[in-house]
């Protein structure tokens, strides 16, 4: 996929100054564009970065060449629930049980493989770049950038707290407070292959929660993260005595749902180039809806 970004100069300055401060490109992106055919043009003509740019002149930058598809991905046909798409990004509602990227035992049946088929069928050459990921059993929104420049800008938004993802979980019991902040460093549990734990030697992790609905034996909770550690929500909720229903790894009951009841239901971000605020939501999946309905008669 070829990505060309255009912008009209609003002031007199050097082309380099405009690329850095008005277009917000990195020095690396400018260096890469310089060596592409017609990579940096002013008024349709290739220009040096030392060019004295005048207000009103149009600048075109080729941020990515064509034919940049992910060669290592095997395109695999599959059902995609696409919630949002524009020329720079795509948001997909991932079902539980599907991995985001190829991994051991899932070399051709990941969400990325399905996206490779989706773009191939449309004749588009797109390198798959996920902005964050979800565990196999976690359902909900996964965001993909369709070019390198968009991926970099979305990654910056995550670091700045502008890219926000919110989760819904059904947990055992009822937290004492309606909302709170969980701070507990997370590390691998010694002697366990997959399990994590709260440990003073771990990496900093912060989880915010808000109780949306209290039931007799469980609660519907909204959560957001200020860090992205492995199994963070699952570990933190279990640590405060409220493991997710269906999460047998961390002590959750398997009686009403057969996987950790966790769903990434909302993403808020800004379009990487226009700055438009984008908010995408994914409905609660069927298994979590049934889990809530099973306790509806027990709501306090």
Image (cartoon, rainbow, N blue to C red):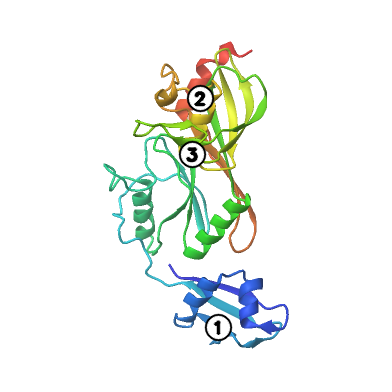
Q: Would you identify the image quadrant in which residue 182 lies?
A: top right
| Tag 1 residue | 41
Q: Report helix, strand or loop for mark 2.
A: helix
| Tag 2 residue | 238
| Tag 3 residue | 140
Q: Are marks 2 and 3 in contact (CB under 8 Å)?
A: no
Q: Is residue 161 above or below residue 297?
A: below
Q: Position of residue 154 (x, y in %)?
A: 55, 56
Q: Residue at x 67, y 22 (%)?
A: 177
Q: Nearer the viewer, mark 2 or mark 3?
A: 2
Mark 1 surroundings: few (<14), some (14-19) or many (≥20) residues within 10 A: many
Quadrant showing the N terminus = bottom left
Distance CA(mark 1)–CA(mark 2) = 56 Å
Earlier in the chain: of badge 3 and badge 1, it is 1
Q: Report helix, strand or loop for mark 1.
A: strand
Q: Is residue 295 above or below residue 232?
A: above
Q: Report helix, strand or loop for mark 3.
A: strand
Q: How many marks?
A: 3
Q: Would you identify the image quadrant in which residue 106 lies?
A: top left
């Amino acid at each position: 996929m070829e990505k060309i970004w255009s912008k009209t100069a609003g002031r007199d300055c050097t082309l380099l100054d405009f690329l850095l401060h008005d277009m917000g490109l990195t020095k690396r992106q400018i260096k890469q564009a310089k060596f592409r055919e017609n990579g940096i043009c002013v008024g349709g003509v290739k220009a040096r970065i030392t060019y004295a740019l005048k207000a009103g002149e149009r600048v075109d930058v080729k941020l990515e060449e064509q034919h940049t598809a992910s060669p290592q991905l095997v395109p695999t046909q599959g059902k995609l629930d696409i919630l949002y798409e524009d020329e720079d990004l795509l948001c997909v509602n991932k079902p539980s049980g599907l991995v985001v990227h190829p991994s051991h035992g899932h070399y051709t049946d990941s969400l990325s493989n399905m996206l490779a088929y989706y773009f191939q069928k449309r004749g588009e050459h797109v390198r798959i770049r996920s902005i964050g990921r979800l565990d196999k059993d976690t359902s909900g929104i996964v965001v993909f950038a369709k070019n390198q420049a968009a991926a970099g800008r979305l990654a910056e938004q995550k670091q700045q707290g502008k890219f926000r993802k919110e989760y819904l979980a059904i947990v055992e019991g009822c937290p004492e407070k309606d909302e709170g902040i969980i701070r507990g460093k997370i590390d691998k549990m010694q002697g366990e292959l997959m399990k994590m734990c709260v440990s003073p030697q771990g990496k900093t992790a912060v989880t915010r929660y808000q109780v949306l609905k209290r039931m007799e034996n469980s609660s519907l909770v909204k959560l957001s993260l200020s860090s992205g550690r492995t199994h963070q929500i699952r570990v933190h909720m279990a640590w405060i005595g409220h493991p997710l229903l269906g999460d047998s790894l961390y002590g959750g009951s398997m009686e009403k749902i057969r996987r950790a009841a966790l769903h990434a239901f909302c993403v808020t971000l800004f379009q990487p180039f226009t700055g438009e605020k984008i908010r995408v939501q994914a409905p609660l999946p069927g298994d979590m809806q049934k889990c809530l309905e099973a306790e509806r008669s027990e709501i306090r």
